[in-house]
Amino acid sequence: MELGPHSRPAEPGRCVSGSPSAGSAFPASRVPAAGAEPGSRPAAVAAVLPAGGCGERMGVRTPKQFCRVLERPLISYTLQAWRVCWIKDIVVAVTGENMEAMRNIIQRYGHKRISLAEAGATRHRSIFNGLKALAEDQPDCKLTKPEVVIIHDAVRPFVEEDILLRVVMAAKEHGCSDYDLEFGTECLQLALKYCHTKAKLVEGPPELWKVTYKQDLYAAESLIKEKISQEICVVVNTKDEESVGHLLKEVLKNELNCAAITPTALDHSGGDVQNFLIDQCYSFICVTVLSSDFQAPRKFLTALEESSLPLLYPVVVVLVHCLDFTFVLPTQKMESLRWIRDLAKELKKRNVLLSGLLINYSQDEQKLQESLQQGASIIAALVKERRPALAGQLLVA
């Protein structure tokens, strides 16, 4: 039997990215799974995620499934990838000491259809306990007894819906399947040995690697940053701002390859913010031209701060203020924009990274283009890096 791709990138940060689906651990376009036929899926599919390991090979005190990537526990990214409508229940097996921490993660990041089971002394025992939770036939049990159960490592955050569907269909046809490509795997070997059923190895994509070592966390962070930087919303309100927004869009396209950059006008209440977050946009550029009126950006920021949606990723907001440096010195304007620093401190608690950017809105077309180019480089860096340390900065292009 031929093995698939490597189980992790060859080196930190060097990840092969595919076309993620709606269930991916990062924002993506909603592409139907290959060969997906709703009527061909089993009536009840569940999953068991063993998450009881201590992460000895990681070399850190915190179990790797709870290590933070972009200030968020790794296991939360894995659970997000399982937001697939046809998977009825997900059982996570964690140790008793981590039970409360797991409940807090589920609540904070809005994960649905998650149940917890006590992890065992070994991975196999944890899986067994998860299966028992699904098999228990009790009046007060809210879990649906499944036809197919998928076993998935809690530290493989980049699984996609199409591979899940392929595994389910293979299980339906062969009675057992497995898509862990590391060594075969031990689950597949056990199924062959004890279940007396046919089995099939379903080859997975290169992204289906396991976070095992510390450098894998950096690789995961790099991949997530790359994905969430691919969509930017340029917020405008007037015709002048629309013009600058269009120019920014063009230069940003060169700075961020393949990024979808959309100029848009929000409603006066800022209520559109929820829609953008639902559509998985986490980068906003608010443009103000030759004006001291920041009412629209403030409404937008207020709506963002008050949003009831869990912010799964750091949201980058850059307030771009265009003024003619011939008449107003940048240092003078920065004094009047100190409120951005104070607001940034509060927004950071909500996982919103706010920065200010001054662009020279020169009447000289060449100088304006140069300023926009410099501004685009700064914006691209803020969007790509998403560093909390840069929040509250007032920058000049």
Image: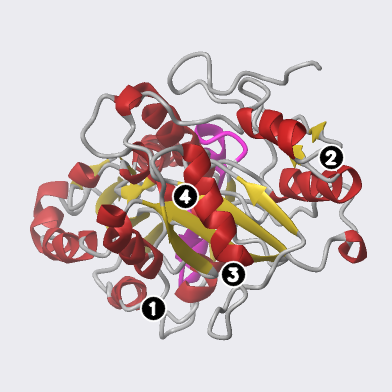
Disc 1, SS: loop
Question: Helix or strand or loop: what does disc 4 sit on?
Answer: helix
Answer whether labels 2 and 1 touch (C-beta < 8 Å).
no
Q: Which residue is mark 1?
A: 308
Q: Are marks 1 and 3 in contact (CB under 8 Å)?
A: no
Q: Is any atom of residue 229 visible in this view?
A: no
Q: Disc 4 designates what residue?
A: 77
For the residues labelled 3 and 2, say whether their Cβ atoms are less than 8 Å apart: no
The x, y position of residue 163, in whole percent, is 74, 43
* Mark 2, secondary structure of its residue: loop
Q: Secondary structure at mark 3?
A: loop
Q: Which residue is mark 3?
A: 136
* Label 2, label 1: how far apart the Cα atoms are: 48 Å
Mark 2: give few (<14), some (14-19) or many (20+) Cα within 10 Å.
Answer: few
Q: Position of residue 85 (x, y in %)?
A: 69, 67
In which image quadrant can residue 82 be found? bottom right
Please state if 248 lies on the left or on the right of 99 as rendered. Answer: right
Q: Amino acid at mark 2?
A: Thr
Residue depicted at x 26% and y 65%? 350
Q: Is residue 274 magenta?
A: no
Residue at 33% in and 71% down:
297
Q: Nearer the viewer, residue 42 or 234?
A: 42
Q: What residue did someone put label 2 on?
A: 197
Side (left or right) of 343 relative to 255:
left
Quadrant in which the C terminus is drawn: top left
Determine the CA span between mark 3 and mark 4: 28 Å
Q: Earlier in the sequence, mark 3 or mark 2?
A: 3
Calculate the distance from the C-alpha at mark 1 to the C-alpha at mark 4. Answer: 19 Å
Q: Nearer the viewer, mark 2 or mark 1?
A: 2
Kind of residue indicated by mark 3: Glu
Magenta: main secondary structure: helix
